[in-house]
Amino acid sequence: MITPDLESGTKLWHLVKNHDHSDQREGDRGSKMVSEIYLTRLLATKGTLQKFVDDLFETIFSTAHRGSALPLAIKYMFDFLDEQADKHSITDYDVRHTWKSNCLPLRFWVNVIKNPQFVFDIHKNSITDACLSVVAQTFMDSCSTSEHKLGKDSPSNKLLYAKDIPNYKNWVERYYSDISRMPAISDQDMSAYLAEQSRLHLSQFNSMSALHEIYSYIIKYKDEVSPTQTPVNAVMTL
């Protein structure tokens, strides 16, 4: 966009509205034109990617349509959170929902969605990063129990999936409900599962490096871990 400047003749504009320009009305008009031009392209891109986003969310928030059995650790962890809620007389559904969202979808999956280079040997450019940020934000909104009030001034990435989020929220609630109805995992079964995973991946990890990370964690939180044990003894106990 170019707009006339009385002093220097012409002035180049970027695609972002220049708030310092003296003629605000002209700036508003130019910014609106850019928004309208790219809105159509934005909606078209969303339509192209919609199936892939739906498939991703359904695979993550499903106990059946995931291609493999639900890991025992997820069931064990969610049951532990429910037990703690019962122990402390927490009956608020939103609290339990938030605990589960914070410990798995928002801690693990959001990082994977936003940073695929953590898992795959790929380069993530700035455009891909911006697109994945929109998907990650939609994912986070789907895990939230609060209602998001949107208006004409809301960010375009929020408006883009506004009609899809209620459906995604239903998937999240169904996922948590389905897991809660699954048979409980005993401590013995969980220990056997972890031992088997350790055996399968024995050559893929450096045990001394992992031990060092645990030691560093205990040094930092030694008082909270066990006031009666030294950090070294605590590590040996683990």
Image (tube, grey):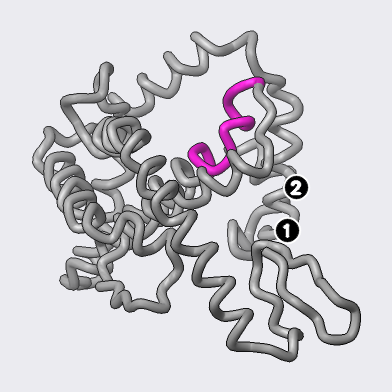
**Which segment is the magenta one?**
111-121
Prevailing secondary structure class for the magenta stretch in the rendered image:
helix
Q: Going 12% across and 40% down the picture, which residue do you hit?
A: 178
Q: Going 70% across and 77% down the picture, which residue do you hit?
A: 18
In which image quadrant can residue 45 be found? Answer: top left
Using residue 128 as the reference point, say whether residue 207 is left or right of it.
right
186 or 90: nearer the viewer: 90
User: Where does the image place residue 146, in percent across and percent down from the top left?
Assistant: 27, 72
Q: Residues within 10 Å of mark 2 (few under 14, many from 20)?
A: some
Cβ–Cβ below 8 Å for labels 2 and 1? yes
User: Where does the image place residue 234, in percent across and percent down from the top left?
Assistant: 64, 45
Query: Type of residue at label 2?
Result: Ser
The quarter in which the C terminus is drawn is top right
In which image quadrant can residue 150 be found? Answer: bottom left
Secondary structure type for disc 1? helix
Q: Residues within 10 Å of mark 1 (few under 14, many from 20)?
A: few
The residue that disc 1 covers is 220
The residue that disc 2 covers is 216
